[in-house]
Every structure is written in structure tokens, then in C-alpha cells.
Amino acid sequence: MVSVHRVPLVGLLALLPVAVYALSVDLIVAVALVNVVLIAGSVTAMFMPSESTAKASAA
């Protein structure tokens, strides 16, 4: 089973085919790279512990 902390890393693996596509077709497709980074960052932020969770586990 995949750990929750590894899910954003799996999202970043989507950069590889997008980069190949951007280099082979047109540079305007580089916008897709930005989208993948934004999605991976959002998923990372979603799975990070909140302040209340961090305080509860530290106490």
C-alpha cells in the first residue's frame, strides 16, 4: 500500500511525459508543466498535517 506521504511524489511523476510532449510538439504545452506542479503542490498541502493536528500530536 502506498503511504499518504508518497502521493504527491506520484503526482510529480506526471512531469516526465508532459516534459517529453512539450519538447517534441510545441513550447506552449509548457503550460501543462505549470499545471502539474500546481496540482502536485495542492495535493502536498492537502496531505500536510494541519496546525491543530500538529499541536495535538506534540502534546
Image (tube, rainbow, N blue to C red):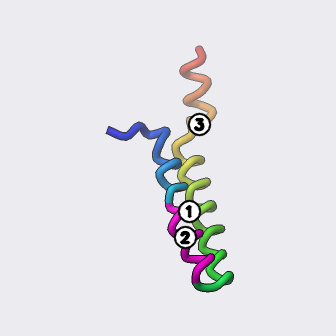
Disc 2, SS: helix
Q: Quadrant of residue 24?
A: bottom right
Across and down, in percent, residue 22 comes to: 60, 77
Labels 1 and 2 touching (C-beta < 8 A): yes
Given the image, on which type of amino acid does mark 2 rest?
A: Val
The overriding secondary structure of the stretch rendered in magenta is: helix
Q: Is residue 23 magenta?
A: yes
Residue at (59% x, 37% y) in the render:
50
Distance from disc 3 to disc 2, alpha carbons, whole Å, reads 31 Å
Q: Earlier in the sequence, mark 1 or mark 3?
A: 1
* Closest to the observer, 51 or 1: 1
In the rendered structure, find residue 15 and report the number of the disc placed on it: 1
Distance from disc 1 to disc 2, alpha carbons, whole Å, reads 5 Å
Given the image, on which type of amino acid does mark 1 rest?
A: Leu
In the rendered structure, find residue 50 and report the number of the disc placed on it: 3
48 is higher (above) or lower (below) than 36: above
Q: Earlier in the sequence, mark 3 or mark 2?
A: 2
* Closest to the observer, 11 or 50: 11
Q: Which residue in the structure is indicated by mark 2?
A: 18
Q: Quadrant of the C terminus?
A: top right
Disc 3, SS: loop
Residue at (61% x, 24% y) in the render:
55
Q: Which mark lies nearer to you, 1 or 3?
A: 1
The region drawn magenta spans: 14-24
Distance from disc 1 to disc 3, alpha carbons, whole Å, reads 27 Å
Residue farthest along the top direction in this orientation: 59
Across and down, in percent, residue 45 comes to: 59, 47
